[in-house]
Image (tube, rainbow, N blue to C red):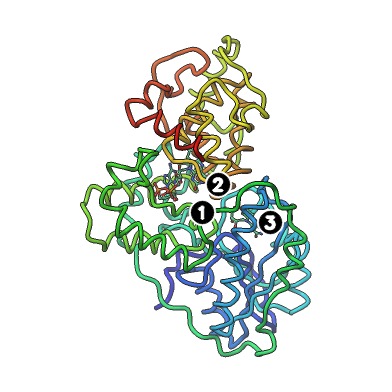
Amino acid sequence: MPMHPERYRLLRQGLFGKGPVLYWMSRDQRTRDNWALLFAQEQALLAERPLQVVFFLVPEFLQAVRRSYDFMVQGLRELERELARRGISFHLLPGPPEEALPRYVSQVRAGCLVADFDPLQIKRWWKFRVAESIEIPFYEVDAHNIVPCWTASPKQEYGAYTLRPKIQRLLPEFLEDFPPLKKHPYNPPEEIGESDWAAALKSLPKSSELPPATNRSGEKAAARTLRRFIESGLASYDRDRNDPLKDGQSNLSPYLHFGQIAAQRVAWEVRRAVAPTDSKKAFLEELIVRRELADNFCFYNPRYDRVAGFPEWARKTLDQHRKDPRDYLYTFGQLERGATHDDLWNAAQREMVSTGKMHGYLRMYWAKKILEWSASPEEALETAIALNDRYELDGRDPNGYTGIAWSIGGVHDRPWGERQVFGKIRYMSYKGCKTKFDVPAYIKRQLSG
Ligand code: FAD
Ligand code: FO1
């Protein structure tokens, strides 16, 4: 079944080379349900060429610490074995991709190049440089979104309420099952082997004293997590998802971030599951609308990680309150150590540092307090991004930049009652949290570690 033509676009024309088709994998690190891999295989089968997956490992990626790299590498090792089973070779190459990839393309005389879509600035820079350094056809496939980002909307959306109807109208056309990845008949067998993972690990940031991720990495673990959520979490998602004491979220974000499972697969299975409609609806709203809204924001607003990227009303109101006295001011170090006067905030910070995942409800409170306790919105934004990108397994992601911009800069939100420091940015209070869940119990649990 040919792939929907809206899912890919040509980044540059070129002459098909004599060698293998290359899938430059980055965002969508999986063999199953991967439109970029399926598209690359289609090109390779048509031209009767070998199919190679290339992955450029860079020692620094948006403040990622070793724990996130270990999670990613564990998944890539499983991926390499899965590809080998289908006769597809995996090539782990030293970065930086914008220089190393054009060299590799000419070295193997690649036929054409396929990349997966990612709205982050660093990825667009990589692609821009690669596109001007090669002469072969270069495609980009949105393997991350159900409705391709460029199809869902041609512009930055104001909020979920403006994107939702566009997504809903297009879902019947794009929320479909996936064809299987075929066994590939053209790769020379000697090409299929194992990468030098030990050498690769040596090039990464040194292992920090952080505890390793608790959840296993890789496609199989991702599929298990989805199954477990559908069996035991989905039914009460609507009720439990905002209670940090209940394990009410799906815990899928690290797998979705590293592309070890397709959001389209999650949506496809959840929609078919037997569970209360309002729970399914609430979950799909987050998984589809909120997540695609984050890609929309980062794709159409290059300043997604700056105060300049906030809406006009938010920049204005934050400016009007720049000089307000701050009841508390904390340094980056104090915040990183969770050493503030607020025991709930400290507990959330500790949860993130120790487990690599902070509960979704607390992430909003956590980021908003950083605005309240920083000397300026710019400093608050920088601090929130740095902590989120360092310690969250699902960090360094459009969802993160957008979630932080929503919390601190009113992106996709509206003006609320005016107050000190926040102006009309939505405020969240300790007292408000106490009406939502058992705060002392949450703090006690984090302290007992
Ligand atoms: P579930 O509630 O089970 O949701 C399932 C999936 O839906 C998530 O994995 C995610 O892909 C998507 N989703 C859920 N909520 C949101 C949301 N608000 N925006 C976009 N997509 C959403 N998410 C990240 O993936 N990486 C981040 O770095 C990140 N940083 C955030 C920072 C702040 C300040 C805020 C307010 C939110 C942030 N989020 C981030 C969004 C959301 O909190 C997480 O996606 C969610 O908590 C992940 O846990 P889960 O997969 O168990 O969520
Ligand atoms: N993508 C790559 O192509 N090469 C890398 O070495 C790499 C490292 C990395 C480390 C942590 C992390 O969270 C993401 C990383 N990514 C890397 C990108 C990742 O696959 C995602 O594409 C983006 O972070 C999400 O848009």
Q: Is residue 436 above or below residue 39?
A: above
Could you tell me which residue is drawn at 74 percent across and 52 percent down? 205
The image position of residue 448, as x and y in percent, is 49, 37
Nearer the observer, 350 or 224: 350
Q: Picture coordinates of residue 197 (x, y %)? A: 70, 69
Percent of width and height locating residue 389:
61, 43
Seen at 60% across and 69% down, the residue is: 114
Q: Quadrant of residue 415?
A: top left
What label sits on residue 128 in the rendered view?
3
For the image, the number of numbered tags is 3
- Tag 1 and tag 2, C-beta contact below 8 Å: yes
CA–CA distance between discs 2 and 3? 32 Å
| SS at mark 3 in the image | helix
Q: Sequence order check: which comes first, mark 1 or mark 2? A: 1
Cα gap from disc 1 to disc 2, whole angstroms:
9 Å
**Which element is circle 2 on?**
loop
Ligand 1 occupies quarter: top left
Instruction: Name the residue carrying label 2.
Output: 356
Decide if residue 207 is on the left or right side of residue 291: right
| Amino acid type, residue under disc 2 in the picture | Gly
Q: Amino acid at mark 3?
A: Phe
Q: Quadrant of residue 439?
A: top left
User: For the residues carrying marks 1 and 2, which lies nearer the camera in this image?
Assistant: 2
Q: Is residue 86 above or below residue 166?
A: below
**Among numbered discs 1 and 3, the one appearing first in the sequence:** 3
| Residue located 78% across and 77% down the image | 107
Identify the residue position indicated by label 1 in the image. Answer: 254
Disc 1 versus disc 3: nearer the observer: 1
Label 1 sits on a secondary structure element that is helix
